[in-house]
Image: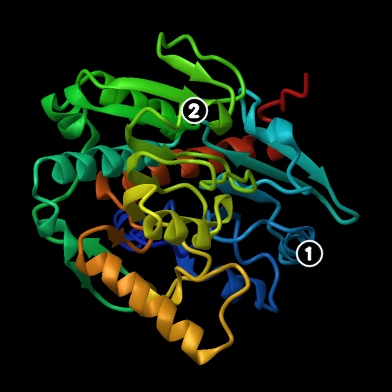
Amino acid sequence: MEKVKPIFVEAMHGFSRPVSDLQTELLPLSYGPLKELLQENVADQYRGLVKGPRGILTADTIQTLVRLGITNIAYVGRHTNNVLPEEFHSADDNVVCIQTDRADVFISRIQHSPLSYAVAAYVLGLSRLMYSGQIAAAHHLTISGGNTFSLRAGHSFIYDEVRGNALFSCLHVVSVGAGDIGSKVIEGFAEGGARVSYIAQTPKPSGHRFLSSLSDLDTSAPVDILTLHLPPGVKASLKTLENIDLFFHTASASNIDAEEIVEALSEGRIQRAIVDVFLQEGDAFAHSVLNPIGNLDDEEEKLQWKRELDGFIEKGRLLLTPHIAYNEPTMIAKTLQAVLANLCKLEDITSGKLELNTS
């Protein structure tokens, strides 16, 4: 019996154990940083790639993967650029074929990722803690090797357990974005009686108040929670906003400049902020990753920036979590299973067992 080639799974926070649990003789999985795979010299070792949300899939990367014999790629993330056409993110089957000079490459993503429930649960769960006076319990972060972090034990947020909390009934919540994650956040708050407004390109059949842009938000009326759920590459600005009690940023670090968050806190236009995504990520995340876009070259400026962040953190006005919003084990396992199923679908397409819908 011919040995089954492994699928290469790009290393992602929280995925190590689910990869180990799902691995079988008929489904061998190899787990590691994508750069290690791209440095391989031997072709035809792997039958496919599970691509994570960190880093954009570029044309050069695709060419390298083709050289290594990998033409089936299943996406966990949602990054867009000129390599992946926009219809990749709206088509029902979420499969595209990219032609190269050596081979056709088939790329898929799961349309409704279970990880969206984890991110929504993070927003709902921390909101519950904030408005019940329990946030001190979530302030302490534990570091368990390298760049893996978790909220303090006892505060694992499950969507069905934190949605519809009665504490939400007195809140006015504004969601910037109403897609896969934003819609679940909206539903979770609305079920608890919150008054919800949302900002999107087009109205949704939700019955909640629709705004076409942030500029349409009435800045004279207090907003309890403003939560950001935009795709990568879409910019938002806090410069004109005020009367915001709590701001959540769990989308993409590129959505908003870090200076704007700190400036809004300094000026009191936003009272509190919880940030989970950063331009740089590492062990010393608290003061190395929430940096201005242009970075700070002057040592005195760096010290001033650090003192300002320290002050907000000590006063309970700023909570930084290092990209852990999605890190809920059950949802990660479900996501990995769905992505691996997509790879099997791609194999059926490339073998001719299944026809790609190009209509």
Residue 160 % position (x, y):
20, 29
Asked whether the beta carbons under mark 2 and mark 1 sit within 8 Å of each other, the answer is: no
6 with respect to 347 (left or right): left
Query: Relative to 305, is 293 above or below?
Result: above
Residue 208 % position (x, y):
40, 14
Residue 118 % position (x, y):
31, 42
Label 1, secondary structure: give it. Answer: helix
| Residue lying at 33% horizontally and 31% vertically, measured from the top left | 222
Residue type at the position of mark 2: Leu
Residue 154 visible, this angle: yes
| Residue lying at 41% horizontally and 8% vertically, measured from the top left | 207
Out of 63 and 203, give the one closest to the viewer.
203
Out of 352 and 233, give the one closest to the viewer.
233
| Residue lying at 33% horizontally and 59% vertically, measured from the top left | 14
Residue type at the position of mark 1: Asp
Residue 319 % position (x, y):
28, 59
Would you identify the image quadrant in which residue 146 lies? Answer: bottom left
Q: Name the residue under label 1.
A: 60
Q: How far apart are marks 2 and 1 (CA)?
A: 42 Å
Label 2, secondary structure: give it. Answer: loop
The furthest residue to the right: 101
**Earlier along the polypeptide chain: callout 2 or callout 1?**
1
Q: Residues within 10 Å of mark 1 (few under 14, many from 20)?
A: few
Q: Name the residue under label 2.
A: 217
| Residue lying at 79% horizontally and 44% vertically, measured from the top left | 98
Would you identify the image quadrant in which residue 228 lies? Answer: top left
Out of 312 and 76, give the one closest to the viewer.
312
The quarter of the rendered structure image containing the C terminus is top right
Query: Relative to 193, is 324 above or below?
Result: below
